[in-house]
Image (spheres, helix red, strand yellow):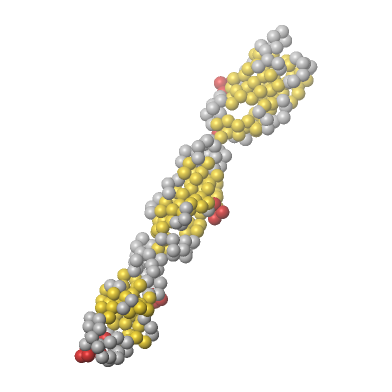
Amino acid sequence: MITPYPQARVTEGQDMTMSCSWIASDVVRGVIWHDNGFSLGTISISQSRPCDIYGKLLNYNEFDVGCDCNNTFSVTIKKVHRSRNNAQWSCEMLIGGRYISSESTTIAVEVGLSEVVLLPLLPQKIIADKEATLKCRTSGGLPPAKVTWFMDSGEGFTNMSTQSFNSYAEVDDVFVVTSKMSFTPSRNNTYIKVFCSVSNVGSEFRSRTAVVEVLSFPLKPVISINGKPASANTHIVEGQSTTLHCESQSHPPSTYTWIFPGGTTIGQDLLLNNPATHTIRQHEGCFVCIADNALNGISTMTFLLNASRSAVCFTFELSPL
């Protein structure tokens, strides 16, 4: 029999030893080692000294052969290279004038990872409610790496691997894994943290933690007058100052423009300062608040949504102070 069996694991660059044994008391006269069915040559055993062996294998500088007594003979592959991965090895023993073959064992060469890269490298800005994709790419390894994704939307990291898809590319007899993870952020998630963790053999590698900024367009503004929600028909009183406030949820924060019968002004608040009878008519009409934010890094355009406009039309009543 051959051991290890059915698989012989070894890390690339290390030596690996396999043994061929006969458990009965018969005298073994020779051993043949096979690599993928190809005979590497016969190692003969002295009849008078059961552990005296002679003969060499093909490419003998790559191998050492030995005897461990009790009808057990070994071969050591020196500094195993990844090209031997999945090779089938077996042995034959010459016993009583006939050769008896062992089962085959499979060499599994392990190549550890050296790094993992989270892509894209630049800081990410994505738009809320639209699908976004990040990539995690490993160095070459055997076996292919396992990739696990983690995301923190503000309540701690959770496993997001079910939303990922892996692809494999064979490069220099090892596998480079590219994992893509897609997600759709909410406008409530202003910042999201993401990283991936990879492993095959040996140490586990973790990528950098990316901080993804989630951009959102302005919602329809809400207008308040002197701290109270505006109604469709609102009146102001002669001699009283009135403050109109405009508020819209967005990231980055919106800038605000008021368009009103008296002109145009920039800012969230519009102050109608102590309108008197002779000036009140210039304020009568529709007041429009425009909320606008520039999504820098997403587009060179400035986005202005029609839905981000809200108007309040004022009528005026003269009331005694």
Q: Nearer the viewer, residue 245 or 47?
A: 245
Image point (41%, 53%), residue name: 211
Where is residue 38 shown, x and y percent of the image? 66, 28
Which residue is the extreme one toward the front?
321
- Horizontal side of 39 relative to 235 (left or right) equals right
Where is residue 189 shown, x and y percent of the image? 44, 61
Q: Nearer the viewer, residue 291 or 232?
A: 232
Tell me if I can see residue 55 in this picture. yes
- Horizontal side of 37 relative to 195 (left or right) equals right
Tell me if I can see residue 174 in this picture. no
Q: Nearer the viewer, residue 278 or 198?
A: 278
Where is residue 167 shown, x and y percent of the image? 55, 49
- Horizontal side of 314 relative to 16 (left or right) equals left
Q: Is residue 179 above or below residue 199?
A: below
Image point (54%, 55%), residue name: 163
Q: Is residue 185 above or below residue 292?
A: above
Q: Is residue 180 above or below residue 289?
A: above
Where is residue 85 shown, x and y percent of the image? 59, 34
Q: Which of the image's four quarters has the C terminus? A: bottom left
Image point (38%, 54%), residue name: 123
Image point (20%, 90%), residue name: 278
Q: Nearer the viewer, residue 224 or 306?
A: 224
Picture quadrant of residue 142: top right
Q: Is residue 28 above or below residue 222?
A: above
- Horizontal side of 216 relative to 284 (left or right) equals right
